[in-house]
Amino acid sequence: MEKLTNRRLYFDYNATSPLSPAVKRWLSEAEFLCANPSAIHLSGKKAAAVLREDSEKILKVFGLSESHKVFFHSGASEGINTIVKGMSHSLDLKGEKLNFFYSSIDHAAVLELKPFLDFYGHNAHQCSVDKDGHLDLNFLESKVKSCLPGTVLINLTYVHNEIGTVFPLEKLIKLKSETGAFIHVDCVQSPGKVHDWDCLPSGIEFYTFSSHKFGALKGIGFTFVNKTSPTFQPLINGGGQQLGFRSGTINTMGIRSTLLALGDLKERYDYSEAKAGINFLRERIREKLEGCGQIIADNSRYKNTNTIFFTVEGKDSNSLLMAFDLAGMDVGVGSACSSGISKPNNVLLNLGHTKEEALSGLRLSFEHELTTSKAALYWGKIEAVLDKVLLSSKSI
Ligand SMILES: Cc1ncc(COP(=O)(O)O)c(C=O)c1O
């Protein structure tokens, strides 16, 4: 995607993405099934059949139709809350407590569960990461082994939303076999951003996604649940839809848009092209910032194909964002707050960066179909802003 309708360049795909071409076509051309798939009249039965087919196809995209079931929700914040709170509730009913392990740089939807778990007497264990955002898995393993079997749930973020680092999924299998822990993988940022985004190990319990991150409608997400997973109480009670995993009238249009957007991704995401494009930009930004800033987690072996997070010495995130904004580019800052006053970025602090560095983070996140020629075009615009910003830093 080169331009939004207002001729701006959009570099904030990790926040949300525009609708994919297939979804736009469908919205403008389709005849929609309006019936509630839980209704027992003919139209309801038709909607239920379409829903079953779409669900099966979505499982198939990720190679999980044999091993997993799927339930749909409003997005990953709800999905993550459902699994963690639901498992803690189920263990409570058995007179046991959950041991929840997560990383200090996980998304707020994970981090903010700690007060809830603490309140109900469960154990939330926050694990630190190194400067490249990687967990010490040996340390995690030894901690997990000291917990009562059957009470451990580990959250892993597959692709990091701010710094773009990737958790190598092949390590999941070892972690699982060494510890026997249940594992939830936050896959929100993986579709169309890593090589094997649609190839997930079948032995893992839970995978959660938000469809608006890859071109579907907003307000829809989904979680894959292994057929052998432990039970979890639903977060939302009501009519018992979706095998009781999540009550509420099912968002059939959101689900169809998910399937269409996944189809587009499969067709259009070219890992090698996107990697070449992001490397082109990374190299130029690295050169430009030499001596006056840095790309975060630049030395990580595992990086995605759309994200560059960097800091500029002496510049706060909001003023960097404004400089890009005035030049017609939408970019992201993790620590933006409604008052407009920058706060130190929590992820940067937890990676061991200084407060000054943590005040100056800026994220560029590009479309799935990035190529070197698009990257070259973008670099012309990005470089002009960085030149201005760096000139003003020097003249202070
Ligand atoms: C890694 C990660 N997990 C979870 C979420 C929450 O997703 P949503 O806001 O769609 O509920 C996000 C959203 O940015 C994310 O990037």
Image (tube, grey):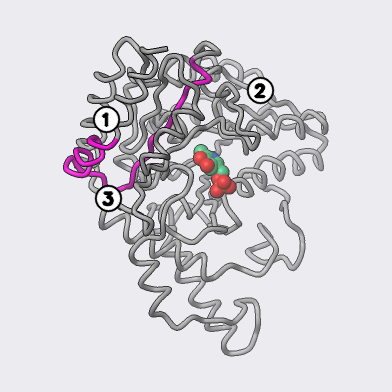
In the rendered image, the residue lying farthest to the left is 373
Q: Quadrant of residue 287?
A: top left
**Residue linked to disc 1:** 383
Q: Cα distance, mark 1 to mark 2?
A: 42 Å
Callout 2: SS = strand
Whole-percent x, y for residue 212 in the image:
48, 54
User: How would you rate the neighbour count of disc 1 (Cα within 10 Å): few for under 14, some for 14-19, many for 20 or more?
Assistant: some
In the rendered image, the residue lying farthest to the bottom is 42
- The amino acid marked with disc number 2 is His
Instruction: Decide which of tag 1 and tag 2 comes sooner along the chain.
Output: 2
**Residue linked to disc 3:** 269
Verify whether residue 24 appears in magenta.
no
Instruction: Decide which of tag 3 and tag 1 comes sooner along the chain.
Output: 3
- The amino acid marked with disc number 1 is Glu
Verify whether residue 378 appears in magenta.
yes
Q: Quadrant of ligand 1?
A: top right
- Whether residue 86 appears in this view of the structure is yes
Whole-percent x, y for residue 124 in the image:
69, 26
**Residue linked to disc 2:** 125
User: How would you rate the neighbour count of disc 3 (Cα within 10 Å): few for under 14, some for 14-19, many for 20 or more?
Assistant: some
For the point 46% across and 68% down, which residue is it? 256
Callout 3: SS = loop
Residues in magenta, as a range: 357-381
Q: Cα distance, mark 2 to mark 3?
A: 36 Å
